Image (cartoon, rainbow, N blue to C red):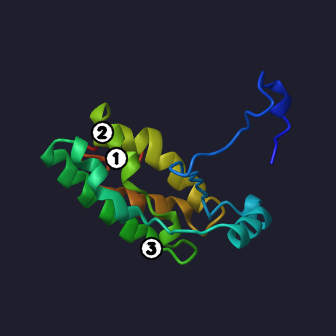
Amino acid sequence: MATQYANLHDNPEDKFYVPENVYIIGTMNDIDRSAESFDFAMRRRFRFIEVKAEDHLEMLNTLDNETKQEAIQRMTALNDAISKVDDLNENYHVGAAYFLKLTSLTFDELWEDHLLPLLQDYVRGLYDEDALLETFAEAYGYPSEVGDVDGNVEA
């Protein structure tokens, strides 16, 4: 079958093709409801493999062992707290890829710049957003020093 670009080849016998050893992998975030009808159409046509947050902890092997263990502990505790919220579930869990940023960020910077904004989006419109965010911060272990969710250190 020729593509719309077949006439761009010098040799008309050259065709575009995908070699047998090439796999095309697409990802979808199934909590984005704006793509719900598209999601349904995609699910009918392709094989879907669920990837859970804890499925790829080995990617954290690039971190030093102490950081890796702390990252796993914090991720697990945070995801447990997320699962306890009635309107959230495992589809909202934070995956190991976020923690790869620890090669250049501290745990507190990861929270402030990446995890907190994500979690704020998750709980927007839910009952008692501030309490939920405080629960998530506690589970994550933020801040490292004794302080409030905004990072203000208490005396």
- Residue type at the position of mark 2: Leu
- Residue type at the position of mark 1: Phe
- Residue type at the position of mark 3: Ser
User: Residue 81's image quarter?
Assistant: bottom left
Residue that appears at 82% across and 33% down: 6
Mark 3, other Cα within 10 Å: few <14 / some 14–19 / many ≥20: some
Q: Position of residue 117 (x, y in %)?
A: 52, 46
Q: Which comes sooner in the sequence, label 1 or label 3?
A: 3
Residue highlighted by disc 1:
99
Give the spatial CA distance, label 2 vs label 3. 24 Å
Taking the image as shown, residue 136 lies to the left or right of residue 89, namely left
Residue that appears at 56% across and 53% down: 25
Q: Position of residue 24 (x, y in %)?
A: 58, 51
Q: Which element type, helix, strand or loop, lies under badge 3? A: helix
Residue highlighted by disc 2:
102
Query: Would you say the residues marked 1 and 2 are in contact, meaning their CB atoms lie under 8 Å apart?
Result: yes
Mark 2, other Cα within 10 Å: few <14 / some 14–19 / many ≥20: many
Vertical order, 80 against 142 (above or below)? below
Vertical order, 67 against 125 (above or below)? above
Q: Is residue 72 visible?
A: yes
Taking the image as shown, residue 61 lies to the left or right of residue 130, namely left
Q: Is residue 152 visible?
A: no
Q: Which element type, helix, strand or loop, lies under badge 1? A: helix
User: Residue 3's image quarter?
Assistant: top right
Residue highlighted by disc 3:
83
